[in-house]
Image: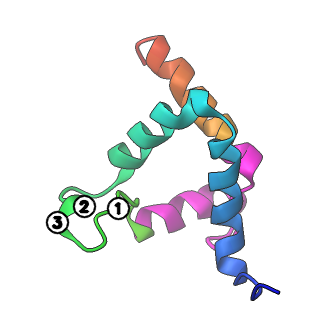
Amino acid sequence: MAAPTPRRWTAPIAVVEAVAKRPDLWTTAWRQLVALAPRGWWRHWPPVPVPDAAYLRFRLQTVYGTDGAPIPPSDAVGYLEWCRRMRAHGG
């Protein structure tokens, strides 16, 4: 039996799983990760384009009313769909 996943990781894993099921959003997801990552993200270990923690806290607070709210996978997918539409329209 596998060890239980810590609660703080269940939401990000669910988001990754939801996006993994949508190959049409993979490029958009990568673009958004890189766009939201701090400058020079590749210089720090591990070299993963993760948005700044302060920015994420701010966005979670403004969207969900708390910075500890997990991001529902449907919201993440909807955001990526919106990003893709805006890019297609030159936005």
Q: Among all residues in the image, which is located at the extreme top?
A: 89
Q: Is residue 83 magenta?
A: no
Instruction: Give the mark, 3 or 1, whose residue is nearer the N terminus.
Output: 3
Residue marked by disc 3: 43
Q: Which residues are magenta?
A: 54-76
Decide whether the magenta segment is chiefly helix, strand or loop: helix
Per the image, label 1 sits on a secondary structure element best described as: loop
Report crowding for label 3: few under 14, some 14 to 19, many 20 or more residues within 10 A (C-alpha). few
The CA span between labels 3 and 2 is: 5 Å
Quarter of the image where one finds residue 61: bottom right
Q: Closest to the observer: 13 or 70?
A: 13
Residue 62: percent from left, percent from top: 61, 57
The 10 Å Cα crowd at callout 1, few under 14, some 14 to 19, many 20 or more, is few
What colouring method underlies this structural image?
Answer: rainbow
- Which residue is under mark 2? 41
Q: Quadrant of the N terminus?
A: bottom right
Amino acid type, residue under disc 2 in the picture: Trp
Marks 1 and 2, the one that precedes in the sequence: 2
Question: Regarding mark 3 in the picture, which secondary structure is present there?
Answer: helix
Residue designated by label 1? 48
Of residue 20 and residue 28, the one placed in the foreground of this image is 20
Spatial CA distance of label 3 from label 1 is: 9 Å
Amino acid at circle 3:
Arg
Residues marked 1 and 2 touching at CB (< 8 Å): yes
Q: Is residue 34 left or right of residue 59?
A: left
